[in-house]
Image (spheres, helix red, strand yellow):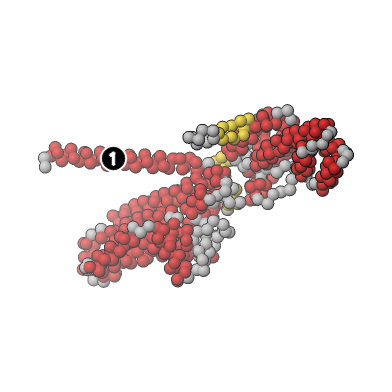
């Protein structure tokens, strides 16, 4: 080959290599940038007074005196909202009482018609709520519509009652929706009983989610399915149109003018996302139990797999002479590395839990053993290649000085191969930390207490970042409310893997430097 051709090929391969590196870097940037951007929102966000109130109530974190001043200011701004709601309900009650009086006039009619109306009016005494009374009045109006007697005035009164009842019923559902949105936005109204669910005890703790609720407060979602050839078209109509002519019309401009004063958003660094336990299915709190569970499973897998993997690699490289049996063993190891991870999960359930019974049900121990089998082929092959890379002169020199085979392996071969072995171990740790399928059947659960004692955790199931990311993204009832938690978990998991790889690079560099000196 001519020199010019060789140089051209060298430059071409160098250019292709650089291009491949740039492509991979760009792909990583495209994938990781949104993850870190959205994940950072779990730590840095505009927290409302509801967030600060929750932290003080549930985690005893914050300045009580300052928070009480904020709550007093917020209550003063929110009070006109509740006053308007009360006035609207009083207005509705007044209208209902007028309808009841009109129904009483019908009940004073002579004959069987008046008696039937009176019997239904007697049921009003047992009605406890406004809408129970409205339901009874609605029944009376329906009966009155069927009046076929000779008195024209009764027919006219029945028609008027029906129209008035329809007006009240038309505003019933929109009013319920409005109150529900306000409850989700601001929390329970003064005087209401505290709900059992923690998410119902507080309003919106994040300003970004509060803005979503405010949008729904001001607008009604409607779907247009008039064109069967297209999917439903989403549109918004002003909610105020549902309450034109009522006292509630005043509510919407007031809320629009005092949006921030209602919740007092403030930029917050919530470090508790990494150290707190979750509350109410991750509606509040942090992900510390998930991080701990991932650490337990990863370390357990490495503790079980590393000794076996290194010993197997030493045997295959130093104590065997080749042959069909060794080739068969290497083929089995390579095949094991390509088995789908879900198969390992099913095997772990069938063998470690049902047959060997290392635990009565899911546990960290069963999950660690399953993950150990999953990463074992990687550790064996990485260790094997690292041991093969040790120069033969090192071994010959040790043996010539009188060292035995095992002593040579232990004092010469393994230290020289340690950088490569560590690389395989750390890569295996990264894989074990990110696996989901094997731990679904052997270790991971969605609901349980946090496990802070590693010894106790061995016999109990655990949370794990990978499993909880999947669970929160697919099965959570309020999945849109906790997007920041999902991305935060992914960011932390990626950070754990990146830190493991960085650790491997640093340790490998230091060991290689020591070996060279």
Q: Judge from the rendering whether residue 323 lies leftward or rightward of residue 172; answer left or right.
A: left
Q: Position of residue 459 (x, y in %)?
A: 52, 66
Which quarter of the figure has residue 352? bottom left
Residue 335 can be seen, yes or no: yes
Count of numbered marks: 1
Q: Nearer the viewer, residue 466 or 289?
A: 466
Which residue is denoted by mark 1 in the rendering? 18
User: In which quadrant is the C terminus drawn?
Assistant: bottom left
The residue that appears at 63% across and 30% down in the rendered structure is 238
Quadrant containing the N terminus in the rendered view:
top left
The residue located at (31%, 54%) in the rendering is 512
Q: Position of residue 383 (x, y in %)?
A: 31, 60
In the rendered view, does 234 fall on the left or right side of 373? right
Q: Residue at x 39, y 63 (%)?
A: 373
Which is more toward the observer, 336 or 167? 167
Q: Secondary structure at mark 1?
A: helix
- Crowd band around label 1 with a 10 angstrom C-alpha radius: few (<14), some (14–19), many (20+): few
Q: Residue at x 25, y 58 (%)?
A: 389
> In this image, 85 relative to 409: left or right?
right
Evaluate whether residue 296 shows in this view. Answer: no
Q: Quadrant of residue 205?
A: top right
Give the quarter of the image for residue 224.
Answer: top right
Task: Give the x, y percent position of residue 258.
Answer: 67, 31
Q: Residue furthest front?
A: 150
The image position of residue 190, as x and y in percent, is 74, 42
Relative to 228, does residue 312 appear above or below in the rendering? below
197 in relation to 297, above or below: above
- Does residue 162 sit above or below 468 in this rendering? above
């Amino acid at each position: 080959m001519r020199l010019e051709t060789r140089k051209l090929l060298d430059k071409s391969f160098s250019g292709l290599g650089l291009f491949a590196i740039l492509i991979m870097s760009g792909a990583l940037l495209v994938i990781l940038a949104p993850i870190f951007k959205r994940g950072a929102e779990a730590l840095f966000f505009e927290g409302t007074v509801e967030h600060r109130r929750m932290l003080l109530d549930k985690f005893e974190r914050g300045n009580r005196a300052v928070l009480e001043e904020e709550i007093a200011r917020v209550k003063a701004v929110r009070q006109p909202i509740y006053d308007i709601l009360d006035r609207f309900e009083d207005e509705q009650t007044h209208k209902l009482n007028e309808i009841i009086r009109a129904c009483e006039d019908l009940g004073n009619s002579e004959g069987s018609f008046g008696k039937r109306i009176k019997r239904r009016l007697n049921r009003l005494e047992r009605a406890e709520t406004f809408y129970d009374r409205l339901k009874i009045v609605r029944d009376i109006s329906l009966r009155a519509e069927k009046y076929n007697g000779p008195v024209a005035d009764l027919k006219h009164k029945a028609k008027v009652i029906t129209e008035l009842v329809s007006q009240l019923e038309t505003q019933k559902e929109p009013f319920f929706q409005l109150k529900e949105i306000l409850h989700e936005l601001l929390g329970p109204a003064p005087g209401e009983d505290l709900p059992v669910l923690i998410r119902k005890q507080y309003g919106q703790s994040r300003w970004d989610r509060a803005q979503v609720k405010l949008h729904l407060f001001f607008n009604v979602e409607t779907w247009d399915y008039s064109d069967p050839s297209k999917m439903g078209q989403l549109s918004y109509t002003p909610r105020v149109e549902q309450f034109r002519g009522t006292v509630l019309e005043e509510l919407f401009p007031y809320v629009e003018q005092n949006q921030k004063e209602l919740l007092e958003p403030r930029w917050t660094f919530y470090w508790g996302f990494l150290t707190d336990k979750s509350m109410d299915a991750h509606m509040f709190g942090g992900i510390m139990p998930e991080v701990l569970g991932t650490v337990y499973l990863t370390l357990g897998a490495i503790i079980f797999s590393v000794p076996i993997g290194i010993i197997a690699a030493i045997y295959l490289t130093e104590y065997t002479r080749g042959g069909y049996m060794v080739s068969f063993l290497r083929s089995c190891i390579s095949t094991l590395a390509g088995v789908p991870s879900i198969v390992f999960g099913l095997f772990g359930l069938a063998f470690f839990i049902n047959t060997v019974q290392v635990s009565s049900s899911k546990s960290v121990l069963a999950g660690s053993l399953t993950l150990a089998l999953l990463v074992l082929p990687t550790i064996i092959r990485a260790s094997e290649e690292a041991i093969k890379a040790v120069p033969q002169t090192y071994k010959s020199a040790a043996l010539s000085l009188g060292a035995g085979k095992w002593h040579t392996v232990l004092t010469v071969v393994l230290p020289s191969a340690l950088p490569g072995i560590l690389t395989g171990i750390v890569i295996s740790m990264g894989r074990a930390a990110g696996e989901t399928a094997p731990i679904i059947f052997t270790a991971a659960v969605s609901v349980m207490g946090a496990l802070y004692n590693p010894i106790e955790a061995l016999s109990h199931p655990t949370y794990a970042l990978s499993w909880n990311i999947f669970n929160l993204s697919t099965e959570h009832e309020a999945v849109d409310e906790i997007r920041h938690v999902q991305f935060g978990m992914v960011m932390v998991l990626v950070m754990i893997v990146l830190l493991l790889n960085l650790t491997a690079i640093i340790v490998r560099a230091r060991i290689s430097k020591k070996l060279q000196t």
